[in-house]
Image (cartoon, grey):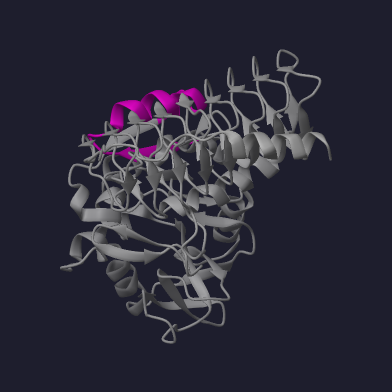
Amino acid sequence: MKVLVLAAGRSKRIKPVVDKNFLEFLGKPLIKWQLESLKENGFEDVVVVGGAHNLERLGVVCREVFPDVTVVEQKDLDMGMCGAVLAGREVVKDESVLIFSSNDVVDGKAFRLVRDTAESDDADACILGKKVDEYFPGGYLEVSDGFISGIVEKPGHGNEPSDMVNLVVHCFSNYAKLVEYLDGAKSDHDDVYEIALDKMMKDGLKFKAVEYDGFWQPIKYPWHVRPVFKYLFDKAEKRVSESAKIADSAVVKGDVIIEDDVKVFDGAVINGPVYLGRGSIVANNALVRDSHVGRDCVIGYSTEIARSFLGNDVWTHTNYIGDSVIGNNVSFGAGTVTGNLRLDEKNVCVDCDGNKIDCGSNKFGLVTGDNVRVGVNTSFMPGIKVGGDSFIGAGIVIAQNIPKKSFVRGDWNLKISENKASADMSGRDEIKNNLKNG
């Protein structure tokens, strides 16, 4: 059985993160975690679909796991999932195939579950489904006696045909038959793949629903990064490298992964779950809690990092970074803070391509791309996004999204007048004497 890994997406909804495939969790990009999971569960014949924007980089990373991997290009990215699946037609041909999205994180048993069902059942296709307790804006399966009669995309709350969501872990006994239906499907929207599957079902091909109860987190928006970190962290071996240097007065508690050459200075507190990447520094009196800190970062004096994901080469000094997703090569000037809680304590909504999306929590902070510089004493309001390669000036409040490659600064009008009040120190001296005398 071949595996077709769909990794050509342009990560539009998670911007300013450039490409979800290369988000580094615990020192490894997401796509590598996914491929290693496939390998651990017995899959060897892998085809990865990328786009012109990430094809070369995908090839380098994928060959670290599967030296003989085939990487193919999806030419028309506007064709969405349909175009990605069709990109494998010259390689997969009429073999059985497992199709899954590189950005949908599931436990490895999900791959085995679908494969084993397909090999033991006479169905034409098997689709992984997960029962949900609350509405999810995705595809729902119409299921009867264990078989699927239809897929309803984003039906809206209260209109769900079942409580089972369609997870993009699909197995087809004959890829060529799927291609035939994809070639014949038409739509003005990004749902050609679902339309083709619906037509296959109506034509009598049997689709088996494979119920799955394990971890599942599609990375669609920035706030989905943290649950994926927590899942991968929980699975990983907890350790403190022998080459890490931790001061006697520092406090390390809870589950931690501290990599090579990390330095934790006096008075710092590491409150797990925490990942500290290779070569990072946690300076005096800093606090890192429930967070991911990439390699070669500096968590500067008296800085707090809370429930956040920091990429590589992030520099801070006397900052508060809360509930945020920070890119690579980002620097925060002293005194800069991220707001993460609205005054009314309602859920934070994030502007994504002009649409306000509820992040599902009343706490969410800043999202940045790579190569960002922020001046001293700047404040970010909750749910703000800053595009990559931007400079943000000092002493200003950022209350709107900032496009990539921006230079943002504010206006300061100083008012200087004569000081008509004398600096009378007698009152202060009296207070000091009272304090000395009890």
Which residue lies at the image location 36% right of the left edge and 49% below the top edge? 14
Nearest the viewer among 220 and 255 is 255
Left/right of residue 136 with respect to residue 436 in the rendered view: left
Position of 144 relative to 275 (above/below): below
Left/right of residue 119 with respect to residue 224 in the rendered view: right
User: Can you give x and y, in whole percent of width and height, for residue 263 in the image?
Assistant: 66, 18
Q: Which picture quadrant has residue 202? A: bottom left
Count how many numbered circles sit on residues in the image. Answer: 0
Could you tell me if residue 314 is visible in this image? Answer: yes
User: Can you give x and y, in whole percent of width and height, for residue 427 in the image?
Assistant: 61, 40
Which residue lies at the image location 25% right of the left edge and 64% below the top edge? 192
Q: Quadrant of the C terminus?
A: top right
Position of 384 relative to 255 (above/below): below
Nearest the viewer among 137 and 42 is 137
Write the start and end of the magenta stretch as one range.
44-69
User: Can you give x and y, in whole percent of width and height, for residue 130 in the image?
Assistant: 56, 68
